[in-house]
């Protein structure tokens, strides 16, 4: 049975992302894909989809869509206060469960102060062709997704609609809560050694503020206090820009380069944000404060392992052993979101 | 010339190899030969630039020390057997309309060097240019090396929008904008040749280590 999704309001920024576009960096093509490549997969896994099936990356909220036909959706990431509207009825949609949508149902993401991005997966994934072996949208080159751009009001996309999700639930083992000041862990960047000792010290002492012109190309930062001295970048012969690189422009503003960045660039890169902390990066809101902390490449790999192992334990099946598993894992990881999960649990029991 | 080299892990999944910090034919040839040879490793991607290349790999598949050793072995073989590869050079013709609405900065470039627009065009089309790298945006080829007689600094303020196919100059580099985008290069002409056609089996008109020959057509 087919299902189509009609966009009633595209919101701040909603875009189709799927697998990373790997193998074309020497032709100038960045990897794209979800800003948080870990949490995003959970929405797909809740629906028995493949981890990188095309889904919606929703930033800030205000997205509203209508289902034409019956299907299932699941949300992972920040709780952007999604609501299911069926006729006159309204029901909150919890993060981390699968929800059935019936023909004519509307889903609205109201937004929240607690997070910035979430991912909404659909049964079987969104049906979009693969371009350069990826379904992900790259807006700067009009590639992938639908029409190579973010969603706009009136867009309609098709759902593959071939999965029947079981009773799966998401444990919030990956912490998405960004504190008032977020500490991003970094390894040494490509031009770390070309900065003076003094500049490096200042870079790690300063705290920065996220600017509102940040996007999937990069998170733009400024010094959080006027009296702090920004460190100045310089021009270099253009060289490769790794994912998460922190480049310092000549006017002294750092930019964390993300999935849609230029593959090469002419500003020095002082540091690289570790993969595990892309989870925090994806939730950075304008005006949020951040600091950087240097760790070793070996420790960065440990953190990466750690995230993958948490990811593997994040989804549990609700069966006879469920309560036991649930309580054990909750204790072990001292889950901060226990109430949220209880809500999910109650919801599933009622279903 | 002596070839220096530096290997550094710039993230948990990427290794940067720096061969030379200079815009130079031989350094670039070495980088490009190395990039081809490294493809036999089980890696995710390679980004090539003028004097360095970045290998993306899966940190779950390799131990860092072993990976570095594998890469260094390939590096040593490539550098010791390196010879300029000229026999298999591919030269692509790019037909360009110069000046006027197609090249709004041709006048500035001519004025900057105190020569006529005609001389800029003649100088520009008298050489073939090596594709040093593709980057910044998909299919954007960085080419050179331009003669000092026409090399011109970037615009002081980038344009918000440069038409697709625009041929630009920045210092002694030249490049073609594959899609309409913001840009700070001095635009001297425009080609109708598509640089990037994602729907094609062979999406990129110019590839690293190709050469381009610019041919003037009447505007």
Image (cartoon, rainbow, N blue to C red):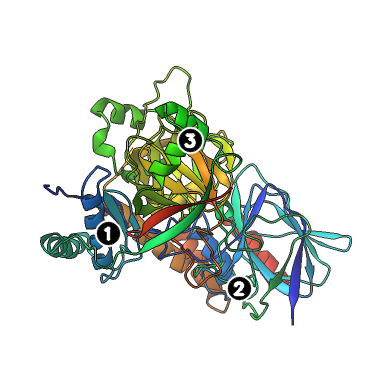
* Residue A303, position as x, y percentages in the image: 35, 55
Label 2 sits on residue: A47
- Secondary structure of the residue carrying numbered label 1: helix
Total marks shown come to: 3
Q: Quadrant of the N terminus of chain A?
A: bottom right
Mark 3 vs mark 1: give the one in front.
Answer: 3
Horizontal side of A10 relative to A88 (left or right) equals: left
- Dot 1 and dot 2 residues touching (CB under 8 Å): no
Give the chain letter at badge 1: B
Relative depth, front residue between B6 and A275? B6
Q: CA distance from mark 3 to mark 2?
A: 63 Å
Q: Marks 1 and 2: same chain?
A: no
Tell me which residue sits at (25%, 28%) in the image.
A196
Label 1 sits on residue: B32
User: Quick check: can you spot residue B151?
Assistant: yes
Mark 3 vs mark 2: give the one in front.
Answer: 3
- Secondary structure of the residue carrying numbered label 3: helix
Characterize the local packing of mark 1: few (<14), some (14-19) or many (20 or more) Cα atoms within 10 angstroms: many
Q: CA distance from mark 3 to mark 1?
A: 35 Å
- Secondary structure of the residue carrying numbered label 2: loop
Q: CA distance from mark 1 to mark 2?
A: 44 Å
Characterize the local packing of mark 3: few (<14), some (14-19) or many (20 or more) Cα atoms within 10 angstroms: some
Tell me which residue sits at (56%, 67%) in the image.
A135
Give the chain letter at badge 2: A
- Dot 3 and dot 1 residues touching (CB under 8 Å): no
Mark 1 vs mark 2: give the one in front.
Answer: 1
* Residue A131, position as x, y percentages in the image: 54, 68
Horizontal side of A20 relative to A26 (left or right) equals: right
Residue that protrudes farthest toward the top in the picture: A227
Residue that protrudes farthest toward the right in the picture: A88
> Please, is residue A267 above or below residue B55 in the view?
above
* Residue A241, position as x, y percentages in the image: 38, 48
């Amino acid at each position: 049975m087919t299902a189509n999704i009609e966009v009633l309001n595209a919101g701040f920024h909603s875009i189709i992302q799927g697998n990373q576009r790997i193998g074309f960096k020497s032709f100038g093509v960045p990897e794209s894909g979800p800003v948080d490549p870990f949490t995003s997969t959970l929405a797909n896994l809740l629906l028995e989809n493949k981890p990188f099936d095309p889904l919606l990356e929703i930033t800030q909220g205000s997205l509203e869509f209508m289902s034409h036909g019956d299907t299932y959706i699941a949300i992972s990431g920040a709780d952007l206060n999604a609501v299911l509207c069926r006729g006159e009825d309204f029901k909150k949609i919890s993060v981390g469960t699968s929800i059935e949508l019936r023909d004519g149902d509307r889903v609205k993401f109201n937004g929240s102060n607690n997070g910035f991005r979430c991912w909404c997966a659909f049964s079987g994934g969104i049906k979009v062709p693969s371009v350069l072996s990826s379904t992900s949208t790259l807006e700067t080159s009009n590639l992938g997704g639908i029409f190579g751009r973010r969603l706009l009001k009136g867009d309609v996309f098709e759902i593959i609609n071939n999965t029947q999700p079981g009773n799966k639930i998401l444990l919030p083992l990956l912490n998405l809560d960004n504190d008032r000041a977020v500490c991003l862990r970094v390894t040494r960047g490509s031009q770390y050694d070309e900065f003076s000792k003094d500049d490096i010290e200042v870079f790690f002492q300063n705290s920065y503020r996220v600017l509102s012109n940040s996007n999937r190309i990069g998170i733009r930062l400024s010094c959080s206090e006027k009296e702090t001295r920004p460190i100045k970048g310089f021009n270099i012969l253009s060289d490769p820009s790794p994912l998460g690189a922190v480049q310092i422009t000549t006017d002294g503003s750092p930019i964390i380069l993300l999935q849609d960045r230029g593959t090469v660039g002419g500003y020095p890169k002082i540091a690289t944000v570790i993969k595990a902390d892309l989870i925090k990066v994806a939730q950075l809101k304008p005006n949020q404060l951040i600091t950087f902390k240097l760790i070793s490449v070996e420790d960065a790999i440990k953190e990466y392992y750690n995230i993958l192992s948490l990811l593997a334990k994040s989804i549990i099946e609700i069966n006879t052993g469920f309560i036991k598993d649930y309580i054990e894992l909750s204790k072990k990881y001292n889950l901060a979101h226990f109430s949220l999960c209880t809500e999910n649990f109650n919801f599933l029991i009622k279903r | 010339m002596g070839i220096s080299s530096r290997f550094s892990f710039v993230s948990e999944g990427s290794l940067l190899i720096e061969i030379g910090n200079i815009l130079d034919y031989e350094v670039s040839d070495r980088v490009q030969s190395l990039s081809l040879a490294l493809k036999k490793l089980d890696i995710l991607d390679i980004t090539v630039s003028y004097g360095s290349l970045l290998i993306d790999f899966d940190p779950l598949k390799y131990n860092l020390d072993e990976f570095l050793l594998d890469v260094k072995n390939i590096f040593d073989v490539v550098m010791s057997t390196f010879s300029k590869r000229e026999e298999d050079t591919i030269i692509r013709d790019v037909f360009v309309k110069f000046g006027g609405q197609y090249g709004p900065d041709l006048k500035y470039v001519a004025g900057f060097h105190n020569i006529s627009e005609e001389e800029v065009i003649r100088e520009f089309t008298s050489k073939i240019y090596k594709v040093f790298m593709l980057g910044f945006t998909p299919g954007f080829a960085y080419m050179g090396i331009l003669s000092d007689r026409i090399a011109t600094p970037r615009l002081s303020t980038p344009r918000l929008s440069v038409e697709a196919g625009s041929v630009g100059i920045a210092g002694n580099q030249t490049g073609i904008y594959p899609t309409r985008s913001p840009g700070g290069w001095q635009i001297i002409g425009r080609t109708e040749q598509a640089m990037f056609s994602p729907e094609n089996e062979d999406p990129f008109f110019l590839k690293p280590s190709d050469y381009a020959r610019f041919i003037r057509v009447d505007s």
